[in-house]
Image: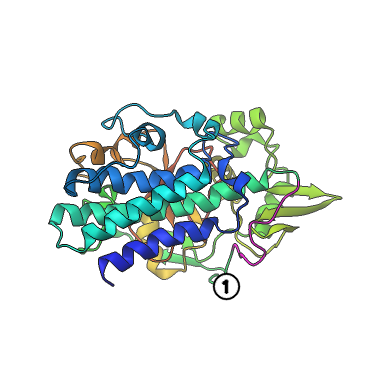
Amino acid sequence: MILSEKYLQIRKHSEQICEPLETEDYVVQPIVDVSPPKWHLGHTTWFFETFILKPFSPGYQLYNDAYDYVFNSYYETIGNRVIRTDRGNLSRPGVKAIYQYRAYVDQAMLRLLENSLSEEVEELLFLGFNHEQQHQELLLTDIKYILGNNPLFPAYHPEVKESNALQSKTREMIGIAEGVYEVGHTGTSFCFDNELGLHKVYLQPFSISSNLVSNVEYLEFINSGGYQNFEYWHAEGWDWLNNNQVNAPMYWHLIDGEWHRYTLSGLKPLDLQEPVTHISYYEAYAYASWAGLRLPTEFEWEVAAQAFNWGQRWEWTESAYLPYPGFSKAPGAIGEYNGKFMVQQKVLRGASIATPEGHSRISYRNFFHPHLRWQFTGLRLAK
């Protein structure tokens, strides 16, 4: 696929995600972790404008000088910005204006892509592709939070499914032999800088489940008092549970004695066979402790991943988000992409049903703070 076609395909997909929305849905920010959909559309456009068009397209005229302040996310190198908590307070630019901004930048990008690109620009282009795909996943999960916290429980789209038939009906523990293994990205295809640094790790013999933990299995944990017994929880997790009055995964609702779950297709009776999702690291750890097992490390997960199906849920691991040997941040704003977040976060592996096609790989390292659960997060057990 030529670069201009790839560019248009990715850009169009972001807008397709937003097609079911009402205009009012674009502007809501219920919590700090959820950005308004219109902000995602503007920010991903700003990324191409700021990192490619401004420095590499001679004569390019900025669409709006103020958009650096509005759509910069966390790049200190770029300058001041609207703080994250205030993204939902911006009634302007409106949704129509942001789509006009996207069209303006797309036209300029297509003109640029008519010419041969330097290696530096091509690398930035592929970073932009993958950056927008990350925001496509965020768009879906943020939209779900916006709609799922509306008391009317409106459906995003009646035909969207949140699981598939990848899991086998039987569970087995897959044994992995003791040994020295290589982990990290291989080959010349795109990866983020936090995946670089192919290196060896020594692993003790271990086994890992062929399946993710399902809703029916997690329900056993709830019914046995798992949320009331501090013995299964980290102290920090126990404080989080009590301070936030958590007693089930996000989007679970007990209605007339029966569990329901809000999904992108609306509020439905809990599907017992689906992999559990929208749980924090604290909950994943507590469940594993209750089950007499544990979470895998990210290295165990990567070594074993070819032996099981993955991709329905981002899977919590027991690994802290740390740099690989030899990691170094790129100069300038691009160097802020991953490295400065390597503190107090846990690694998740795999992908989810919200991950765009072609965006996942075994070496991908996602990362979140332990209390977060608005993404499609789940768990796989190890011992």
What residue sits 75% from the left and 43% below the top? 151
Question: Residue 247's x, y, as percent?
Answer: 70, 40
Is residue 153 a member of the stretch shown in magenta?
Answer: yes
Q: Along the line of sight, which residue is nearer the eye, 234 or 178?
A: 234
Q: Along the line of sight, which residue is nearer the eye, 381 or 352?
A: 352
User: In the picture provided, is 144 more to the left or to the right than 67?
Assistant: right
What residue sits 54% from the left and 50% below the top? 141
Q: Main secondary structure of the magenta part?
A: loop
Secondary structure category for the residue under label 1: loop
Is residue 117 a member of the stretch shown in magenta?
Answer: no
Tally of numbered tags = 1
Q: Is residue 139 above or below residue 211?
A: above
Q: According to the image, label 1 marks what residue?
A: 165
- Crowd band around label 1 with a 10 angstrom C-alpha radius: few (<14), some (14–19), many (20+): few
Colour scheme in use: rainbow
Q: Along the line of sight, which residue is nearer the eye, 261 or 74?
A: 74
Say whether residue 257 is visible. yes
Question: Residue 233's x, y, as percent?
Answer: 58, 37
Question: Residue 343's x, y, as percent?
Answer: 36, 33
Dividing the picture into quarters, in which one does residue 308 lie? bottom left
Question: Residue 224's x, y, as percent?
Answer: 73, 47
- Amino acid type of the residue that numbered disc 1 sits on in the rendered structure: Ala
What residue sits 70% from the left and 62% below the top? 272
User: In the picture provided, is 53 more to the left or to the right than 166?
Assistant: left
Quadrant of the drawing holding the N terminus? bottom left
Q: Along the line of sight, which residue is nearer the eye, 66 or 236?
A: 66
Dividing the picture into quarters, in which one does residue 177 lie? bottom left
Say whether residue 296 is visible. no
What residue sits 74% from the left and 59% below the top? 268
Q: Is residue 353 above or below residue 92?
A: below
- The residue range painted magenta reads 152-162
